[in-house]
Image (tube, rainbow, N blue to C red):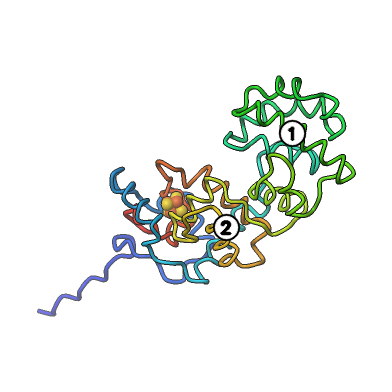
Amino acid sequence: MAPKTPRKPSKKRSGKKAPGRSVRQSLDKARKGKAAALKPPKKRLAADRKAIAGAIPQWTPQEVEEAFRRFQAATAVPKGELLHSDPYTLLVAVVLSAQATDAGVNKATPALFAAAPTPAKMVALGEDKVRDLIKTIGLFRTKAKNVVLLSQKLIDEHGGVVPRSREALEALPGVGRKTANVVLNMAFGEPTMAVDTHIFRIGNRTGLAPGKTPLEVELKLLEVIPAKYMLHAHHWLILHGRYVCLARRPLCEKCLIADLCKWPGKTVAA
Ligand code: SF4
């Protein structure tokens, strides 16, 4: 009797990544919800602690390139979600968005910008009326004061125009490094990286850019992301954090970069 030929292991059962899988195949697989599963909540918390301590592997330059190639393939030109019509209304919207959601800011700004679309009109509207129009947004008292003060400063020192300079932006009331980075990126097309809560989490959790402070994460991201992706990298990462890599329960099963991400909270890599 002839000896039995051993059966080849099926690719489907092995669960291993097929060599040479194209970006399109990875995207298709991720969209079908088979990218990665999660460990139980306690282990996910432990994984986040490990990641934030910088105790997970670093990405290779090829992996970073691949991740951003996929983000670009999925959304060529990502858009921010804050309503605005020009650099001034963008600046005000970003100032209002500190410790608030974009959706919450967007509920208040149409009425505010209808009443005061320019620095001069904002100053004329006055702090009390601005406060009334933005009272649904957290920290509205301080923000109303800052919006009027920064509008006055734009008139006094910059001819009523938003300056294209980090120093000048950060000298405006209520404007810090993150706000300046958003304005430089969105209004002036500068390759900056504004690190908000989502990007801080993703940088640490994935191992892409570990850091104890937003500035550390920002500098690391600027170092590792290829220059050709920098213009849109901020929005790709923010949208990824807002809709996929959620704080409590990341949707690893739908994640485009699940096979590249180093987070130890996953159970199955793509
Ligand atoms: S980047 Fe993707 S795989 Fe990694 S933790 Fe976030 S959702 Fe999960």
Residue 21, placed above or below residue 106: below
Crowding around mark 1 (Cα neighbors within 10 Å: few <14, some 14 to 19, many 20+) is: many
Mark 2 vs mark 1, CA separation in Å: 26 Å
Left or right position of 150 against 201: right
Picture coordinates of residue 89 (x, y %)?
A: 77, 37
Amino acid type, residue under disc 2 in the picture: Glu
Left or right position of 13 against 69: left
Q: Residue at x 15, y 75 (%)?
A: 4
Q: Picture quarter containing residue 228?
A: bottom right
**Mark found first going from the N terminus, 2 or 1:** 1
The residue identified by callout 2 is 218
**Is ligand 1 within 8 Å of the beta carbon of the residue shown at mark 1?**
no
Q: Nearer the viewer, residue 226 or 19?
A: 226
Q: Residue at x 54, y 50 (%)?
A: 199
Query: Badges 2 and 1: C-beta atoms under 8 Å apart?
Result: no
Q: Nearer the viewer, residue 15 or 5?
A: 15
Can you say which quadrant of the picture contains the N terminus? Answer: bottom left
Q: Tell me the number on the disc at residue 147.
A: 1
Q: Residue at x 43, y 54 (%)?
A: 205
Residue 92, placed above or below residue 36: above
Q: Secondary structure at mark 1?
A: helix
Picture coordinates of residue 223 (x, y %)?
A: 58, 67
